[in-house]
Every structure is written in structure tokens, then in C-alpha cells.
Image: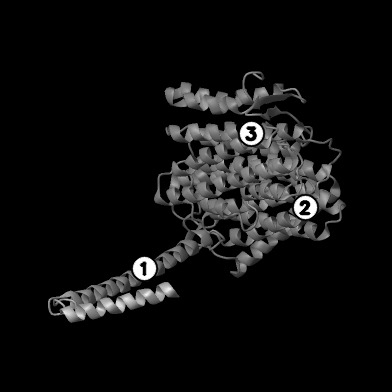
Amino acid sequence: MIDLVPPGAVMVLGALLVPLLRGRVRQAYMLALPVLGFVQVVMLPSTFVWSIQMFGYDLTLVRVDELSRVFAYVFHIAAFLSVLYALHIKDNVQFVSGLIYAGAAISALFVGDLISLFICWELTAIASLFQIWARRTEGAYRAGLRYLIIQVGSGVLLLAGTILHYADTGSLEFQELGLVSTGTALIFLAFGIKAAFPLLHGWLQDAYPEATVTGTVFLSAFTTKLAIYALARGFPGTEILVPIGALMTAFPIFYAVIENDLRRVLAYSLNNQLGFMVVGIGIGTEMSLNGTAAHAFAHVIYKGLLFMSMGAVLYRTGTIKGSELGGLYKSMPWTTTFCIIGAASISAFPLFSGFISKSLILTAAAENHYTLTFLVLLFASAGVFHHSGIKIPYFAFFAHDSGIRCEEAPRNMLIAMGCAAFLCIALGVAPGYLYALLPYPVEYDPYTTSHVVNQLQLLLFSAGAFVFLQKTGLYPPELKSVNLDIDWLYRKALPALVQKVAGGAGRLKGRIQARSLAGIERTVRYVRGHHAPTGALGDPWSIGATALWAALLLVAYLGMAYL
């Protein structure tokens, strides 16, 4: 298999056969694809390289190292869980696009040149679009168009940067690039768009909540984590990433706390967690890069679990607004339990996966004297406990009895959530298995007394603050409202500006046309007036008048010729 297809191609090519299958055969086939892909990655030798020459360029289709392998492992796990979670639906569009999307992202992890990366980059963008459009609503259609423009735009920047970088260096190798030229700056910006940097993040909160119940689970796993991998590969130790990542961890907290749509809350939470990874890349030490890889691995699973639980709520109740939910623990006890496990994981409770990954990044920041960044990360850790650790399960399942009584989630959804919950706990209890997969050797024990006590103190303080704000009425209530974010600029302001400019241009064009027509009409009237039978030029001229005008014209001509 190694010699036949690159990693990820198993799912991309296998997805094309899905519409030809039916029933349990189709289900078993789709679940087998990520399993086969996972086995292929396990079997790849650590130094395996597969290069070809095409159009005069050396393209590296497969280049294996531990950084690409650890991301590939979790991408295959996410693909398997996403397919399992979606088995109850009959929509081939979602399955085919989801498998191609996952396979393209996995292929991107192993390519060793920028042209191959660009191809995989754009394939992930196009395939993931159908996870949004498959919802088949007007809002999803418009959000999908905006998503496509931004994602394809990221690819265009990547291609432009690649061309300039090749012109500067003569190399297409995808390795550590650094911010050293216009080309690498464009590549950095392309990665930043997909990683949802501040002011470039609006597409995430705009598109993900508009996707289907199962599509959001697919989306949460691959696009942004592929960007994190690309940054870790191309720009480790780039200092500007530290403040960018710190800002990413902090600003989504305020939006998430006041947001009513709980899937949109999770989208802001996703942005917050990406910030920790970006900080780790910016610090650039072995510990911080290990922390980024570990946190990406843990995050794919626990964030997928949270999106699964909220997707199950949306599937059974038809709404995901916090103001309309509550009391669902009575109808959906298993979903409630799994959601709480995901919430504990993202909040970095000891014995859950987030604790053993986030602590690597926090320790790296402290040891390398990023004091202000460390404090911002602590604030962000407390904030994520508020909006994802408490708000999500509290307002969905406990806050008040909404009166909604529904069935528990379908069995396949529960099994997928159960598998993700097991991994969240297993990684937290036995972190050594994850640490063994990381790019660099790990000599780190997260379960020291100081680490555990400090984290419990932080969580206790955050919980106390939530209770105080809730009891005093200061905590923002769940209201039926729309919160404005940076996407407002291109969703509302820009179209309104274009419409206003177009309207003004139309009115100006109308005035110009009207005045031109009026001028033409006056000219026509003037000519008609002089050439009419009664006009100056209408009657026949006498012989004397004709001779006089001929003489005058002759004099004028002779004068001009002389001069």
C-alpha cells in the first residue's frame, strides 16, 4: 500500500465508491477506510520519502517524520468517529465530501513541497464546503459562499507566496521558511487565514454553526488543525506568533460568554484553543512544539465530542439556542454525561486530556520568561472553563426546564461520543502514550503537586466567579440576539457600501445620460431650425450672396496658406 498511494489517498479514492454501496455494507466500508489509512500510517518507515518529477519540478508526495505522523494519527481517529457519528444519515454528499476532506487533509500532512501542499490545501477547502451546503438552507448557502471565497483566497495567497519563494530561492521544499521575504510572508498569511488569526477569524464563527449536525464535527477536526501543522512546519520560533496566539486565546472569551447559539460558542472556543497552539509554535522550543502537537491531538477529540453532543441536541430538539434549552438531562442523560466529559477535558481538569497537553505550553511559556503571555494564557484557561466547561452543559442540560422532552441521541451517535469520551479520559490518565508520539523526546510529568494544585485553584476560582455572577444577575443571560463580529464587515457593511456606491453610480449615469440626450435634442432643434425652408440656410441664396461668401472663403483659405 505504501508504494501504491500516498497517505490520505485511501479515503479520497475510496470515497468515490460510497454512492455505489447500500445499507450495512456501505457503513462497514466507510468505517474501514480510516482504519486502513491508520494502518498505512503506522506501517510507514520513519524516514520514508516518495518523490516524483512533474513539469520539470521535483514534487515530494510523501515525507514521513514524527510531526506529520502524530497529526495523521488523530486525523484518522477523527475521520472514523465522524463517520460513525453520521451513520444514521442517508446523504451521500456528506459522506463523500467528508471522506475526501479528511483524506486531503491527511495527504497535506505528508507532502514535502509547496505545490503539492497547495493542491491538498484547495481540495480540503472545496470538499469541506459541502458539509455546509448539505444543510440546504438559505443561511447555509450564503455562509458556504463566504467560506469558499475565504478558503480559496487562502490558497491563492499560498500559491502566490510559493511562486515568489521559488523565484527567490529556486526551492519548493516545504520546510522551515521563516518570515524572510515577501513570498514567505504571503505563505504565512495563507496559513494564518486557515488558522483563524485575529481579524481573519470571522469565517469560522460564520460557517461552522451553519453546517449540518454531522458536518460541523468533520469541520472542527481538520481545517484549522491543518493550518496549525503548517505553521509548526514552516514557522516554528517565529516571535510574532506569540502575541498573535495570546490574543487568540483571550478575545473569543468575551464573545463566547454572551453568545446564545451554543454551536457558535464552541466555534469561539475553538478559536481560543487554537491560540494556545499558536503560542507554542511561536515560542519554538522542543517542549512548546510538543505541547502544540499534544494539544492539537487532544483538542481534535474533545472539541469533536462537544460538537457531537451539541449536534445531538440540535438533532433531537431542532434548536441549539441556549435561551430555548434546559432540562435535557432528563431526556438525554448519556449525551449529558459525554458533554460533561468533553467540558472537563477542554477546561483542563486533572485526569482529562486537556490537562496533560495544555500544561506543556504553559510550562514552556513560564520557563522561557514569557511572563505576560503566561498570565494571558492563565486568564484564557479560566475563561474557557466559563464558556465551554460550564456554559455549554449548564445552559443545554441544567439551567432551567425548557419543557422539551425528546428521545436520546441515536445509537451510533452515542457510540461515537462514548469512544471520544473514553479517549479524553484515557489520555488524561495515561499521558505517556500520547507523549511517546510527539516529535521530540518528552521528559515531563504533568501530575506534580504544584501543577495539579495550581490548576485546581484556577478552576475553583473560575467556578466561584461563575456562581457569583449567576447569583447576582451579573452574568450575561441567554438572549435571542445576534452578536456582531468581524464578519459583519463583509456580511453587512461591505455589501451595503457596494450597494450604495452602485446606486450612486447608477444615479450619476442617469444624470449624464439625461443631460447628453438633452444636448443632442437641442443640437437637432438648432440644425433643423437653420435648415428648414424658413431658416437662414433653407431658402435658395441669391447669386450675389453666393459670390460674396465664395470670395470670403477664398480670402480665408489664402490667409491660412500664407501663414
Position of 336 relative to 69 (above/below): below
Who comes first in sequence, dot 3 or dot 1?
3
User: The residue tagged with tag 1: helix, strand or loop?
Assistant: helix
Tell me the residue that label 2 is attached to: 455
Mark 2 to mark 3: distance in Å? 42 Å
Rendering coords of residue 258 (x, y %): 57, 62
Position of 169 relative to 475 (above/below): above
Identify which amino acid the numbered label 2 is placed on. Answer: Gln
For this view, does 212 lie left or right of residue 430?
Answer: left
Position of 323 relative to 96 (above/below): below
Q: Quadrant of residue 353?
A: top right
User: The residue tagged with tag 2: helix, strand or loop?
Assistant: helix
For this view, does 459 lie left or right of residue 561?
Answer: right
Rendering coords of residue 285 (x, y %): 83, 45
Circles 3 and 1: CB atoms closer than 8 Å? no
Of badges 2 and 3, nearer the viewer stands: 3
Of badges 1 and 2, nearer the viewer stands: 1
Who comes first in sequence, dot 2 or dot 3?
3
Residue 106 appears in the figure? yes
- Residue visible at 78% across and 48% down in the picture: 361
